[in-house]
Amino acid sequence: MTGLFDPLQVGPLLLPNRIWLAPLTRCRTDPRHEPGPLMAEYYGQRASGGLLVAEATMVQEGNSAFWNEPGIYSEAQVKGWRLSTDAVHRAGGRIVLQLWHGGRACHPLLNDGRKPVAPSPIAISDGEVRTPAGQQPYVEPHQLDDNELPALVKCFALAARHATAAGFDGVEVHGANGYLLDSFLRDGTNRRSGPYGGPIAHRARLLLEVLEAVAAETPLMGLRISPLNSYNEMVDSDPIGLSSWLAERLNDLPLAYLHVMRGDLLGQQHGDVLTPIRERFKGVLVANMGYDAAEARSAVASGAVDAVAFGTAFLANPDLPERLRLGAELQAPDPATFYTPGPAGYTDYPSLKAQP
């Protein structure tokens, strides 16, 4: 019976355990979106995870959606990320970078007046975005023309090349949570016609083109999807059908793993997407959202998934694998510090060894 602490082969990497760090946006860069020593400390602290998936990182200048999230489009950013990859590798860990375009969740006040972009001109109407001028409503995005899409594909490919130069062991393409690639994938936000709209095969075209381009620039490529998640006002008329089709199609690509957010952060959409994905996808399957230690052990032991990615539990417990191995109590995260600057609620969660 497979356990959480059994090794797992993922592409060229042999992982020592199946407890992953999920990508968590923390907004700790400087205004130029350059990672620094504080981020290196944070990731180095969590190096015991089987694989660390670093946070959503801008592939192109001008698509900030969070304010002070990292980028990977400049040489300074590559140099800054090298601090984190070196810290993780010195501690014996493995780390990949999540490549991301914010799409319609971006805001002009975060991007020198640039309008956000999307498959269709549909604004996020529920919620606001944090900007230097305070909370602001989202704006209607520019509908991308078909002839604008090849340049975006090139941005993802170049970002993967930069990630390799920064010392990452691979990349994870962000195809989830209502950001650019996900907004093309799901029919609630993709209302266009032509080669990138309509049936699933057309809506998935941009994602597949990105994956093909990125694969040529990295030794390891993963993909994260969220077929049920309604965050950023996302919905699809047939999430099970979409998941099933995509899982089958992804077998044609050199994908090291598929990372699935199994549910809905807002609890609005329900269903089982993991089972049809597991039945069709032949590679390594990683699941995320709401797992405790017992369910994670059961999911891996049963073969339902190959690994489990933990978010806020790993945020608040830098030595999470050791705590799970010992059955130790987990520290609770502080949501008030999720996106604030500085070490508070970031690098000051103690490990078991550091506690009196």
Image (tube, helix red, strand yellow):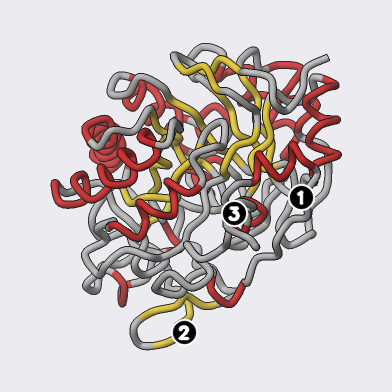
**Which residue of the protein is positioned furthest toward the bottom in this rendering?**
133
- Residue furthest front as drawn: 356
Q: Is residue 254 left or right of residue 274?
A: left
Q: Earlier in the sequence, mark 3 or mark 2?
A: 2
Q: Which amino acid is tagged 1?
A: Gly
Q: Position of residue 255 (x, y in %)?
A: 49, 19
The residue identified by callout 1 is 290
Q: Amino acid at mark 3?
A: Ser
N-terminal of the two: label 1 or label 2?
2
User: How far is mark 3 from mark 1, CA to CA?
Assistant: 22 Å
Label 3, on which residue? 351
Q: Residues within 10 Å of mark 3 (few under 14, many from 20)?
A: some
Q: Is residue 147 visible?
A: no
- Judge whether 151 appears above or below 215 on screen: below
Tag 2's secondary structure? strand
Q: Mark 1, residues whose alpha carbon is within 10 Å: few (<14), some, or many (≥20)? A: some
| In this view, the mark in front (1 or 2) | 1
Give the residue type at disc 2. Gln
Q: Identify the residue shown where x is 62% and y is 20%.
A: 284
Q: Position of residue 194 (x, y in %)?
A: 44, 36
- The residue under the point 25% across, 70% down is 31
The C terminus lies in quadrant: bottom right
**Residue 92: x percent and y percent?**
44, 31
Q: Secondary structure at mark 3?
A: loop
Q: Distance of mark 1 from mark 2, alpha carbons?
A: 28 Å
Nearer the observer, 325 or 102? 325
Decide if residue 54 is on the left or right side of residue 40. right
Q: Does the rendering let one see residue 80? A: yes
Q: Residue under circle 2?
A: 135
